[in-house]
Image: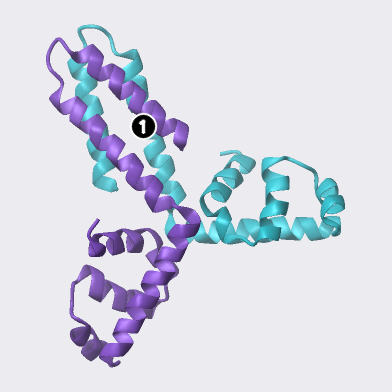
Chain colours: A cyan, B purple
Amino acid sequence: MEKKVMQTYLYDFYGDLLTEHQRNVYEAFVLDDLSLSEIAEVEGISRQGVYDLVKRCDRILEGYEQKLHLLARFLKNKEKIMRIQALSRNYQSGNEAQAMAEIEVISSEILEEL
Amino acid sequence: MEKKVMQTYLYDFYGDLLTEHQRNVYEAFVLDDLSLSEIAEVEGISRQGVYDLVKRCDRILEGYEQKLHLLARFLKNKEKIMRIQALSRNYQSGNEAQAMAEIEVISSEILEEL
């Protein structure tokens, strides 16, 4: 997974555990895709300060994921739900029973793991 | 939702953010359903101490949920996946297209909210 995509996911899951200042800087860098220099100017801190803060947020967010695994759990289920969506969209007439059986298996798998 | 069920869910989601001691006591009370007195004896602390610790853990776990809402998100999706599972199990022959259309809508809703 591309790094900023992973950072966006981690921020979406655990971002509210960061301080407001950390969130502002991290959002500017990861979500708004501003450069370190641009953020430094807005926040009134050094470019190195912004860099360190982003790295620190990465470590904090990754630390939560290492303990809780909620993002990993979510991504696994997301794939399964995408498979259900594809089956419901692309089944062939006459083949409904087979597609339904697969949907039943996948939905049961998701519920068992929850 | 029954209180111990909610406590079990919260513990499942955020329990690894508690200390080992907190986890031991909370698991004994919530998952193993031991009494405060029984836990007090095992842990070598007072009954009141166990009670206070369980309440403290409740507040910590609820605090994470208030910030992150990951359990609420999960429970909402769980209901939708149960609906997909029911549709895949109970559709009537000749009515497959309608059940499939509903599955498509629900799976898309889940994916949009992720």
Q: Residue shown at 27%/18% (left/top)?
A: B100
Residue A107 percent across, percent down from the top left? 26, 34
- Using the rendered view, name the quadrant where residue B52 is placed: bottom left
Q: Residue shown at 35%/61% (left/top)?
A: B10
User: Is residue A39 found left or right of A93 in the rendered image?
Assistant: right
Q: Residue shown at 24%/65% (left/top)?
A: B4
Describe the element under mark 1 as helix, strand or loop.
helix
Quadrant holding the N terminus of chain B: bottom left
Tell which subunit mark 1 falls on.
A
Which residue is labeled 1 in the image? A81
User: Is residue B106 found left or right of A27 in the rendered image?
Assistant: left
Does B42 appear above or below A42?
below
- Using the rendered view, name the quadrant where residue B20 is placed: bottom left
Does B96 appear above or below A5?
above
Residue A90 percent across, percent down from the top left? 34, 14
Q: Amino acid at mark 1?
A: Ile
- Name the residue at the top extreme: A93
Q: Residue shown at 45%/36% (left/top)?
A: B113
Q: How many numbered marks does the figure carry?
A: 1
User: Is residue B91 found left or right of A19 in the rendered image?
Assistant: left
Does B108 appear above or below B44?
above
Residue B68 percent across, percent down from the top left? 48, 55
Residue A71 percent across, percent down from the top left? 46, 48
Does B29 appear above or below A52?
below
Disc 1 crowd rating (10 Å Cα; few below 14, some 14-19, many 20+) is many
